[in-house]
C-alpha cells in the first residue's frame, strides 16, 4: 500500500509474504502483521529475534515505525494486556509489528539455511517435509568433537547432546525448538537443534543417533540480521537495523 513514493507497513508485509509466505507457517503459529496499521508510512525499521520491552524501547528511541521479528509478539490469546507488556508498548509508541516465524524457518535463505551455513555444511537441501535442512560435514566426525564444534560455531553458552555412538557426516538442522523434527534423523546421522523437552530427549535417545541442542537463542539470534539484510535489499531507501539483543538467562 505505497503512498506516493512513501513505503508503508503493508509493503513490508507483502514483501515478507513473498520471501517467506505466511501460509507456509505451522497451523498453531501466529504470523504476519500482528500490531499496528498497514497504511502507516515507514522510514525506519528495527529487526529482532524477540519483541521485548527493551527492543520496543530501542525502536521508539530511534524513531522507528515498524519492528519485524522472528518470534511472534502475540502468540497465545490475550486475556489481559498490562502496561509493561510488549504489545501494549508497541501501541503506546505507535509502532507496528510484523512477525515471520515458522514460515521463515522453512523459507529459502531463512533461519534453517542460516544455521546450516553457520555449521559450514555442504550440499544443503530441505528434508522430506521441508521443515529442516540437511547437509554434509565433508568427512566423518566423532559425536563429541562435532558437539564441541557446534558450541564454538554457534557461540552457544552450553550444548547438550546424546552420543549416537557412530561417526557423523550427514547432519539435519532445525533451529529453535526441534523436538518435533526427530523424524529427520531417518535422513541424517545427527540432528542439531536449539532445545528439546525431557520426553523428546528420551525419544531422541531411542533413535540411536546423535542429537545436539545448542540453545534456542544461539541457533536463532542471527535471524534478526538475516531479516535486516533481506529488508535492506528490498527497501534500500528505508533505514533498517537489527536490535541489540542478549541471552535472556545466565549459565553457571
Image (cartoon, rainbow, N blue to C red):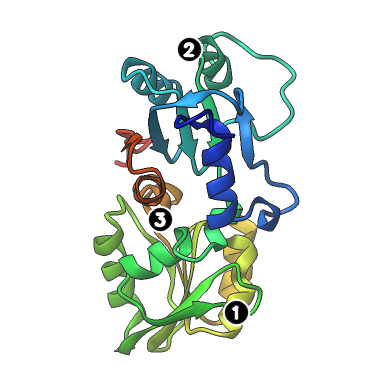
For disc 3, the marked residue is: 219
Determine the image quadrant of residue 6.
Answer: top left
Above or below, comparing residue 52 to residue 212 in the picture: above
Q: Could you tell me how far apart the alpha carbons at marks 3 and 2 are, in whole angstroms?
A: 30 Å
N-terminal of the pair, mark 3 or mark 1, is 1
**Does residue 177 appear anywhere in the picture?**
no
Above or below, comparing residue 15 to residue 37 in the picture: below
Q: What element carries label 3?
A: helix
Left or right: residue 181 versus residue 65 is right
Front of the two marks 1 and 2 = 2
Residue name at image x 48 percent, y 37 percent: 68
Viewer-proximal residue among 55 and 59: 59
Above or below, comparing residue 78 to residue 110 in the picture: above
Number of the label disc, if any, that sits on residue 131: none
Mark 3 near mark 1, Cβ–Cβ under 8 Å?
no
N-terminal of the pair, mark 1 or mark 2, is 2
For disc 2, the marked residue is: 93
Front of the two marks 3 and 1 = 3
Amino acid at each position: 500500500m505505497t503512498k506516493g513514493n512513501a513505503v508503508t507497513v503493508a509493503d513490508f508485509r507483502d514483501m515478507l509474504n513473498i520471501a517467506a509466505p505466511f501460509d507456509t507457517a505451522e497451523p498453531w503459529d501466529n504470523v504476519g502483521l500482528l500490531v499496528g496499521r498497514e497504511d502507516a508510512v515507514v522510514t525506519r525499521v528495527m529487526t529482532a529475534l524477540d519483541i521485548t520491552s527493551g527492543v520496543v524501547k530501542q525502536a521508539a528511541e530511534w524513531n522507528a515505525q515498524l519492528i519485524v521479528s522472528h518470534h511472534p509478539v502475540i502468540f497465545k490469546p490475550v486475556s489481559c494486556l498490562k502496561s509493561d507488556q510488549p504489545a501494549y508498548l508497541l501501541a503506546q509508541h505507535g509502532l507496528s509489528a510484523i512477525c515471520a516465524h515458522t514460515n521463515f524457518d522453512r523459507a529459502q535463505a531463512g533461519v534453517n539455511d542460516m544455521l546450516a551455513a553457520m555449521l559450514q555444511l555442504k550440499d544443503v537441501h530441505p528434508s522430506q517435509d521441508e521443515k529442516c535442512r540437511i547437509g554434509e560435514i565433508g568427512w566423518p566426525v566423532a559425536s563429541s568433537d562435532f558437539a564441541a564444534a557446534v558450541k564454538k560455531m554457534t557461540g552457544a553458552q552450553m550444548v547438550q547432546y546424546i552420543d549416537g555412538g557412530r561417526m557423523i557426516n550427514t547432519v539435519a538442522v532445525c533451529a529453535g525448538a526441534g523436538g518435533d523434527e526427530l523424524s529427520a534423523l531417518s535422513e541424517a546421522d545427527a540432528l542439531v537443534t536449539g532445545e528439546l523437552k525431557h520426553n523428546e530427549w528420551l525419544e531422541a535417545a531411542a533413535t540411536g543417533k546423535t542429537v545436539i541442542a545448542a540453545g534456542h537463542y544461539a541457533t536463532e539470534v542471527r535471524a534478526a540480521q538475516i531479516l535486516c539484510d533481506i529488508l535492506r535489499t528490498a527497501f534500500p531507501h528505508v533505514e533498517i537495523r537489527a536490535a541489540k539483543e542478549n541471552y535472556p538467562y545466565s549459565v553457571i
